[in-house]
Amino acid sequence: MNLEKAGYWATIITNIPYAIVGYFGDYITFIGGILLCVGSSLMHYTYNSTTNKLDWGSMYIYFFAIFVFVLPLAIPQASLIFLVLCGLSILSADVVTSNRAAIGLVVIMTGVVSYALGGNFAIHGMILFSIALAIREWGHTKSLVVRHWTHSLWHVLTAIASYLYIL
């Protein structure tokens, strides 16, 4: 198997950690993890505008679910309402417009809230997210082979960073 084909499959398989991390949270993070695992895998398997929206929409759901999980006063009903709204946003054409900034903001807010609430590993999670983002952005300027492998690394590192937030 050549490196390009292996990297292509790696971008699909490396979405599994999101579902595993979600399992260690609550049912909302688990649903978010499953959705991101499936949504991102479908997008990497067959890229089109629908799967791209599904990928980004499921990222919103997953990262906001992690954010809701770290809030001590969050009630399950509020989390479910949020998930429904995020799910509806997948259908919107505008969901992809400023996606990187929005996801980055959620990740930073989650880390700050987790740290403020005594999260022992929140700073580590923010550092790991930053490293993952740097690797991903660097890789997207390179060849297709490098892009696949750095994006796969992004999946794994951001899943681990998410886990550090919910510890």
Image (cartoon, helix red, strand yellow):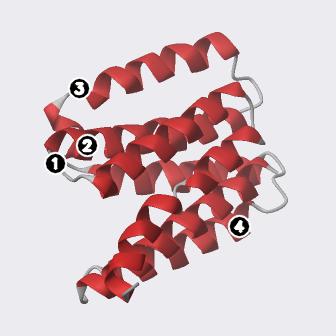
Q: Is residue 23 left or right of residue 132?
A: right
The residue indicated by pointer 2 is 51
First in sequence: mark 3 vs mark 1: 1
Number of callouts in the render?
Answer: 4
First in sequence: mark 4 vs mark 3: 3
The residue indicated by pointer 3 is 91
Identify which residue, 95 or 52, lies in the foreground.
52
Asked if 31 appears above or below 160 in the picture, the reply is: above
Residue 123 - label: 4
Asked if 35 appears above or below 119 in the picture, the reply is: above
Crowding at dot 3, Cα within 10 Å, few <14 / some 14-19 / many 20+, comes out as: few
Measuring from the top left, give residue 35's x and y in whole percent.
49, 36
Closest to the camera, between mark 3 and mark 1, is 1
Residue 109 - label: none
Q: Are marks 3 and 1 in contact (CB under 8 Å)?
A: no
Amino acid type, callout 1: Asn
First in sequence: mark 2 vs mark 3: 2
Crowding at dot 1, Cα within 10 Å, few <14 / some 14-19 / many 20+, comes out as: few
